[in-house]
Image (cartoon, rainbow, N blue to C red):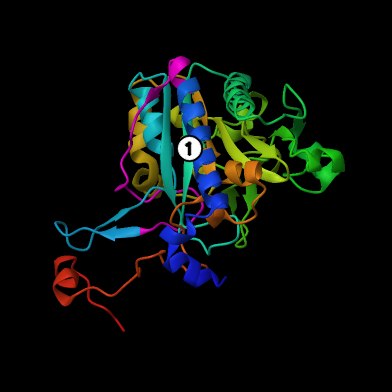
Amino acid sequence: MNEELRLKYRYLDLRSERLQHHLRLRNLYVQACRQHLLKDRFVEIETPYLTKATPEGSRDFIVPSRLQPGKFFALPQSPQQYKQLAMVAGFERYFQTARCFRDEDPRADRGFEHTQIDIEMSFVEREDVMQTIEAMITKAVESLGFTIKEKPFPRLTYKESMERYGADKFDMRTEEDKKNNVLAYAWVVDFPFFEKTDEGGWTFTHNPFSQPKPEFLEDHLAGRNVENILTTQYDLVCNGYETGGGSIRAHDPRTLRATYKTMGYSDEEIEESVGHMLEAFKYGAPPHGGIGLGVERMIMILTGETYLREVQAFPMTGSAHTSVMDAPSALPEKALIDAHIRLSA
Ligand code: ASP
């Protein structure tokens, strides 16, 4: 049936056995992760949705401020900075089923909003986070009746994965595995921290808040050998998809400042973008690290669906309109005046 029509009457579409199954499975998966984390002494903390533009590599959705004309909030691309601040605040083990907003062109497996099981932990190293996540995912998917191909999940360096698969996400399943819907998880580690921009400068490959690997810390602080610096980033791959990623974070202000210096930021620009983080770290930040795990990606894999919208209750249409309701839509003049917006066309 026509896609736009299906989404216009999404509540009827959702009556189908397939979508009922997918959304119920999604619920069970998220609940299994939540139960596991709560047992493992994690605390669920909600972070703001109206916040400051975050430097995470995508375009922000912006919200005009009525009370402060000419100023804007941004919807978070992820709770990255607030979860790190929760570590500074002494929570040590945080999680949240968080909505993330990214104004990118929608694709089959990517939309404006997605949900992430978002985690951060204090006093950990890379391997501690990977093991914690592995235990949670194993528990959750096995409790739902799925089989994991290899445990512990294989670990490949970025270099190995590029040599072996020509990509940093890959499918390790045999034809037989595919028939039986086996889950082939793997970790990819040792990514380059920076890549060249079109303008010839440097930008981060994954996350500007990451800590470089210890053997590159000195180079990093000195802004030397930039092309060879490896980060503590880890990505979780499953059946050809990237289903999550995270890192150990820079918790010393000097390290975070050096990242922005390498990216060509002036002192004022650094202050403007991450001054609040540098300030917070001055009061003593524990070493910490975490991860964001895409819920929809995981459910797509569990259900064998290739479209994100098949695992979301009320997804956007391909032409970026909401299902059932007609948004984005025009606003009455009064609402525009309140928001201090004058349309140019
Ligand atoms: N903030 C990252 C993301 O949304 C995840 C993380 O590093 O924890 O991809």
Looking at the rendered structure, the secondary structure element under dot 1 is helix
Quadrant showing the C terminus = bottom left
Residue at image point 57% right, 32% down: 247
Answer with left or right where residue 192 lies relative to residue 125: right
Residue at image point 48% right, 48% down: 56
Answer with left or right where residue 324 lies relative to residue 334: right
139 up-or-down from 158: above or below: above
Pinpoint residue 242: horizontal percent, then vertical percent.
65, 43
Residue numbers of the magenta segment: 37-61
**Mainly helix, strand or loop, the magenta region?**
loop
Q: How many marks?
A: 1
Magenta segment: does it hold 82?
Answer: no
Pinpoint residue 291: horizontal percent, then vertical percent.
53, 33
Quarter of the image for residue 232 reads top right
**Which residue is tagged 1?**
27
Residue at image point 62% right, 24% down: 130
Answer with left or right where residue 98 lies relative to residue 148: left
Pinpoint residue 5: horizontal percent, then vertical percent.
48, 71
Quarter of the image for residue 306 reads bottom right
Res 240 seen here: yes
Magenta segment: does it hold 41?
Answer: yes
Under mark 1, the amino acid is: Asn
Pinpoint residue 240: horizontal percent, then vertical percent.
73, 45
